[in-house]
Image (tube, rainbow, N blue to C red):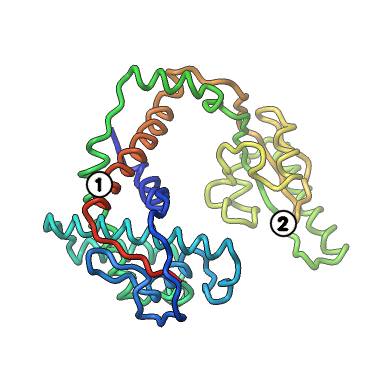
Amino acid sequence: MTRRFVVLALALALGLMGSPWSLVSAAPPSAQDAAAQVNGKKITYQELNGEFLARTRVPFDKVQDDPQAQQARKELLQQLIDGELVLEQAERQKLTVTPQAVDEQVKSIRARFPSDEAFKQALGDTGLTPEGLKANLKKGMLRQQILNKEVLEKVAVSPKELETFFNEHKDTYVQEEAVHARHILIKVAPDASPEDDQKAKERAKVVLAKAKKGEDFSKLAAQYSEDSSKDSGGDLGYFGRGRMVKPFEEAAFALKAGQISDPVRSQFGYHIIKVEARREAKRLSFAEAKEWVEKDLTREKARVRYGEYVAGLREKAKITVNLK
C-alpha cells in the first residue's frame, strides 16, 4: 500500500498534542534566548518567530497583542518541540540524507517559481536563506525517515476495518455532481470601455459560429482562446459546483453533454463553453470508495500512532518551556 498520502497528515499531527508545561514569565527575551529546551538543545525565539513568519507570512511582533496569534505561537512551539524529539531519534539511529537528495528537493521547490528572483523573494519573505532552506529540508527528510519507520510501517488496516469505517462514514463517500468542460476565453480588460467590451463579444460570436458549424472545439480553443488552457485545447477537466466563477458555473451546469453555450460574461471576459460529459451526484458503494476509505482510515490510524510515539519520546525527554 502506498503511504505517501499521509505524509502531510503526519506533518500536521505535530501540532495535535496539547502543552503539558506551564509558561514562565520574565523580561522580554532576545532572539537567541531559548523559548524551549529539549534535552539541552535550544529552540530559540529567533527560530520560533522565524517559523511563525514562514507559516503565517506575518511577523509575530506585528500581531503579538492578538490572543489568537499568541495561542498559535504556543502551539507552534509544541510542534517544534515534537519535531526536535523526532529529529533526535534520527540522529541516534545514525540516519543520513545526502546533499544530492537535498539539492533535488531545492530544485523541485525552485521549479514552482517563474524565476530565480521570484524564488529568492519568496525565501526572503519567510525569513529564510538558501542555506537555511537546505538545513530545514535535511531535517525534514530525516524526520520523515523516522516517521516512515516508526509510524507508517506500523500502520495496517484489515478488510473488516475498512468495511466498518465505510459503514460509519457513508455520508462522506459521495460523488459530487460534476461536468467535464472545455472553454474558449476572449479576454476583456477590467477597465475596458463599453466599445471594447462589445468588440470582444463580437469576436466571441465569430468563434462561436465556427464551433456551432462543427469545427473542432479543441482546435478553436488552441487558436483563439486567450488563457493558458488553450495549450490543452481549452480542457478544464471535471469540476464540481463552487470551483468556477458563478456565471461560468451556472452556464456549464445548465448544458447537456455535447452542447455549447452562447458567450458567457465573467470578470475575465467572454467564455464559450462546451460540456464534454456530465457526472451525476450519487452515493458511492464500498467497492467504488474503497481506495478513498483506505486512505482515510490509514491517515486516522497514523495520527493515533504518531501521538503515541511522540508521547513515548516525551516521557523520556527533559523539556523546559520558557515562552514569554
Which picture quadrant has residue 25?
bottom left
- Which residue position holds label 1? 312
Total number of numbered discs in the rendering: 2
- Residue 229 relative to residue 204: left or right: left
Percent x, y of residue 251: 75, 38
- CA separation, marks 2 and 1? 55 Å
* Helix, strand or loop under label 1: helix
Labelled disc at residue 257: none
> Which residue sits at x=26%, y=47%?
147
Indicate which disc, 2 or 1, sits on the residue closer to the N terminus.
2
Above/below status of 77 relative to 294: below
Percent x, y of residue 201: 80, 53
Query: Mark 2, mark 1: which one is toward the viewer?
Result: 1
> Which residue sits at x=43%, y=65%?
23
> Which residue sits at x=36%, y=65%?
321
Above/below status of 127 relative to 152: below
- Residue 184 relative to residue 32: left or right: right
Q: Amino acid at mark 2?
A: Phe
